[in-house]
Amino acid sequence: MVLAGFAALGVAWWSQYALGHVPCGLCLWERWPYRILIVLGGLATVLPRDMARSLLWLCLPVLLCAFGLSVVHVGVEQGWWASPLPECRAPTFHGGSFAERLASMPRRPAKPCDAATYLVPGVPVSMAMMDGIYALALIPLVRRGLRIRAKFRGRGRKTIQG
């Protein structure tokens, strides 16, 4: 899970800093589950097996949240619904002088959440869609890892008793 979290964040940061893609508010929210995966996976490596197993079980709802955030973002990109975040909407100015309008503008320009970012040109899969696919692909890996741990744990008990 640590490697999976770092891989997801690494692609996001590479896209942002190497390719110059500006993340929107939803993009920044979509990074949080992978930060949580890194923490859970890191703790699982240093805790006793039973506690580590519990932490690995917690990775499943975190991945489902990552998928849910991806669905929300894809829905906004496709125009199915409006973004739940106020920073994804264009600023509105109500009267006042030009100086007051400049003062009310955000410090850094925000990318609208309905403008999809495509990592691979010509492939109609946005980064938000890739995030959802990635989260869904990790769920069977976590479940398999939990089964493998249980299998090894069961073998250890049989050899000690027998």
Image: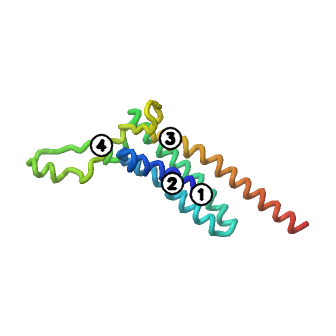
Q: Which residue is mark 1?
A: 58
> At 47% from the left edge and 48% from the top edge, which residue is drawn?
11
Alpha-carbon span between mark 3 and mark 1: 22 Å
* Cβ atoms under marks 2 and 1 closer than 8 Å: no
* Cβ atoms under marks 4 and 1 closer than 8 Å: no
Q: Give residue 151's position: percent from left, percent from top.
A: 78, 56
Q: Give residue 44's position: percent from left, percent from top.
A: 62, 64
Which quarter shows the C terminus?
bottom right
In the picture, the disc for residue 130 is 3
Return the disc, 3 or 2, that comes first in the chain's sequence.
2
Q: Which residue is mark 2?
A: 34
User: Three-letter amino acid code at disc 3?
Assistant: Met
Alpha-carbon span between mark 4 and mark 3: 23 Å
Return the disc, 4 or 3, that comes first in the chain's sequence.
4
Total marks shown come to 4
Return the disc, 4 or 1, that comes first in the chain's sequence.
1
> At 30% from the left edge and 43% from the top edge, which residue is drawn?
89
Alpha-carbon span between mark 4 and mark 1: 33 Å
User: Three-letter amino acid code at disc 4?
Assistant: Arg
Return the disc, 3 or 1, that comes first in the chain's sequence.
1
Q: Give residue 95's position: percent from left, percent from top.
A: 11, 45
Alpha-carbon span between mark 3 and mark 2: 14 Å
In the picture, the disc for residue 87 is none
Q: Which residue is mark 4?
A: 89
* Cβ atoms under marks 3 and 2 closer than 8 Å: no
* Cβ atoms under marks 4 and 3 closer than 8 Å: no
Alpha-carbon span between mark 4 and mark 2: 25 Å
Q: Quadrant of residue 50?
A: bottom right
Q: Residue furthest left?
A: 97
> What is the crowding at mark 2: few (fewer than 14 residues within 10 Å), some, or many (at least 20)?
many
> What is the crowding at mark 4: few (fewer than 14 residues within 10 Å), some, or many (at least 20)?
some
Return the disc, 2 or 1, that comes first in the chain's sequence.
2
